[in-house]
Image (cartoon, rainbow, N blue to C red):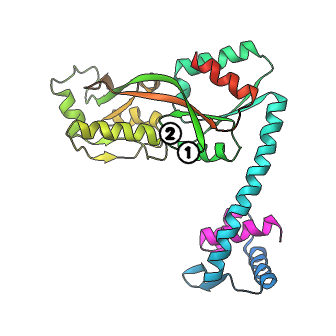
Amino acid sequence: MDLRRLRMFMAVAEQGSITDAAKYLHMEQPPLSRQISSIEEDLGVKLFTRSRRGTELTEIGGLFLQKVIPLVRERDNLFNYIKTLKRSHEGVIKIGFVAGVLAVGAIVSGIKRIKEMKSDIRFELICGTSEELTERLIGHDLDIVLLWGPISNKGLVSYDIYEEDMLAVIHLPKPHQSLPADIYKNLYTSDLIIFPREFSGGLYDSIIEHTVSAGTSPVIRPIAPDVTCIPPLVAAGLGNAIVPLSVTKTYSGDICYVPVPERLRCQIVAAARKEVPSQIVALFVTVLRR
């Protein structure tokens, strides 16, 4: 049984519907149905039950899925590992980063220095959430990831790259309005705009822990897709926020940035696999940490 058919089985199991699975796989429904039936015939068991509610795994189907998932992932990891070796041989480094990190001057300067040192290096940049990027890093689809720390994944090693202050983002109802005397009271009593935790768990936890330590309980609004979207949402009057200093460069209309009481700082880290890094990855980390 080839991996292509196993992926079809996984898609139906995960989507809970042959129709949805066919859309996910970018194929027509009848061929997918035939493939699933063929798998069941080969194995001599029923993997799914069909009903008006959709397609559900049988008990045997669920046990089969538990074996299929690591098998397919191991194949993908092996394939990506070979691609990692190929990238290293060709002088390519594939970097994952969360939105906003490239606004940090130290990161940009580091990339520039590496390019000056080794002009033949080629960079491939992938933007995503911290959860997505760390998963791809473990699977050898990325060489290194830049994100706000700390990270807690035991399969990765992290290097501290840069530390910066975090600032409060306050909405100004009127352009060029002077700052109100109770500005910090407004910060902690109005809605607090933030991003979903999967975007950056370390940054999210730092902000929430800070509001708790301040003895306040603002209404948390995880409505920003990423941290760079927060300032415009504050300007729109949807609440206030706390963001890294580097993010303040991205927007300035109808808002003000002020220091956070009881100074709050955040770290940018580079995450890599625990295996011996390639020469390019080792150079990248060394230069960024200078």
Residue 210 placement: quadrant: top left
Is 69 displayed left or right of 35 in the figure? Answer: left
Quadrant in which the N terminus is drawn:
bottom right
Q: Is residue 238 visible?
A: no
Is residue 42 magenta-colored? no
Q: What percent of the width, then of the height, locates residue 282?
A: 69, 25
Element class at badge 1: loop
Determine the residue positioned at 73% across, 61% down.
72
Residue plotted at (25% across, 30% down)? 173
Q: Residue furthest left?
A: 181
Q: Position of residue 235 (x, y in %)?
A: 34, 32
- Amino acid bearing label 2: Ile
**Residue where numbered disc 1 is placed:** 154
Question: What are the residue bounds of the magenta stretch?
Answer: 1-25
Q: Which callout, 1 or 2, points to the residue nearer the camera?
A: 1
Answer yes or no: do the residues labelled 1 and 2 have beta carbons within 8 Å? no
Q: Badge 2, how many Cα within 10 Å: few under 14, some, many 20+?
A: some
Hey, what amino acid is under mark 1?
Answer: Lys
Number of dots carrying numbers: 2
> Can residue 246 be seen in the rendering of this structure?
yes
Kindly identify which residue carries mark 2. 151
- Depicted 38 relative to depicted 70: above or below: below
Residue 190 badge = none
> In the figure, residue 52 lies in which quadrant?
bottom right
Q: Quadrant of residue 178?
A: top left
User: Percent position (x, y) of residue 115?
Assistant: 72, 17
